[in-house]
Amino acid sequence: TIRRITAPEISARKGGEPIVTLTAYHAHTAAVADDLVELLLVGDSLGMVMHGLETTVPVTMEMMILQGQAVVRGSKRALVVVDMPFGSYEESPAEAFRACARMLKETGAGAVKLEGGVRMGETIRFLTERGVPVMGHVGLTPQSVLTLGGFKAQGRDEKDWDAILADARAVDEAGAFSIVVEGVAEPLGAKITELCKAPTIGIGASAACDGQILVMEDMLGLTDRVPKFVKKYGTLRDHIRGAIQAYAGEVRDRSFPAPEHTYSMKKV
Ligand code: KIV
Ligand code: NA
């Protein structure tokens, strides 16, 4: 039997071989990636990728639980981490604990992720002391898009560094087992990695991070609009369109279904 990678095992990878991670929202994509990555994140980016939302703000606990269950079922080895959606954890440590406990119990995931630095420090400590492994998320935090006024890279001006470094430190000191660093100037990504004892997982951050993450549909070339930090390792959109065009042509000229795809009568 294959044993799951645990949150403490991810923590122990600090400064070692880079930690390979991807998002997954479905059982089948989780199964395809399971033995190739260390960690699968059920990101609230599923709101945009799966549901066509403009931001992650409207994503619900129910959406995250459903897809979290699918990814846990589809995988055997990777640590599954589920994003806590906007509005489920920010109000108080007690509220966060109830929501995170529900998430872990109903999905079987190994950890949760929540956004925010200094303001979430007390909550992350409360959770980790009570058995909830927490992945932090600092830098560009998409759930704050309405107050930020858009998705913009952070820390490109040196005067902004202190606040972002304080955020990373707060999450680290509160006991996060690892920290996503999103959309920051490259030298700041490297600096956060150097200062934190927890491994950093970069997305639009720095190759110096202890690991990297991308949204799977973005790196496969399935989504059309992608941020600067996405490298497309595949051209899934073209493959899917080509397959659908071939199917459409064969349906129209009646060459599909062929005899091998149809059922004959039983021989009597
Ligand atoms: O929701 C998401 O996909 C994420 C990662 C990109 C870090 O939070
Ligand atoms: Na997210």
Image: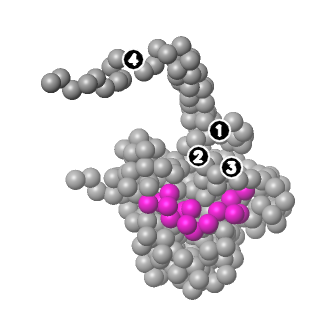
Q: Residue furthest left?
A: 268
- Residue 224, compared with residue 121, is above or below; it is above
**What's the magenta region?**
55-69
Pick whichever, 146 or 64, lies toward us.
64
Q: Which residue is mark 4?
A: 258
Badge 4: residue crowd in 10 Å (few <14, some 14–19, many ≥20): few
Disc 1 secondary structure class: loop
Q: How many marks?
A: 4
Foreground: disc 1 or disc 2: 1
Pick whichever, 11 or 241, lies toward us.
241
Foreground: disc 2 or disc 4: 4
Residue 223's disc is: 1
Q: Which residue is mark 2?
A: 215
Mark nearer the N terminus (1 vs 3): 3
Badge 1: residue crowd in 10 Å (few <14, some 14–19, many ≥20): some
Foreground: disc 4 or disc 1: 4
Residue 52's disc is: 3
Q: Amino acid at mark 1?
A: Thr
**Tags 1 and 3 in contact by the CB under 8 Å rule?**
no
- As measured in the structure, the alpha-carbon distance from the residue carrying label 3 to the one carrying label 4 is 36 Å
Residue 32's disc is: none
- As measured in the structure, the alpha-carbon distance from the residue carrying label 1 to the one carrying label 2 is 10 Å
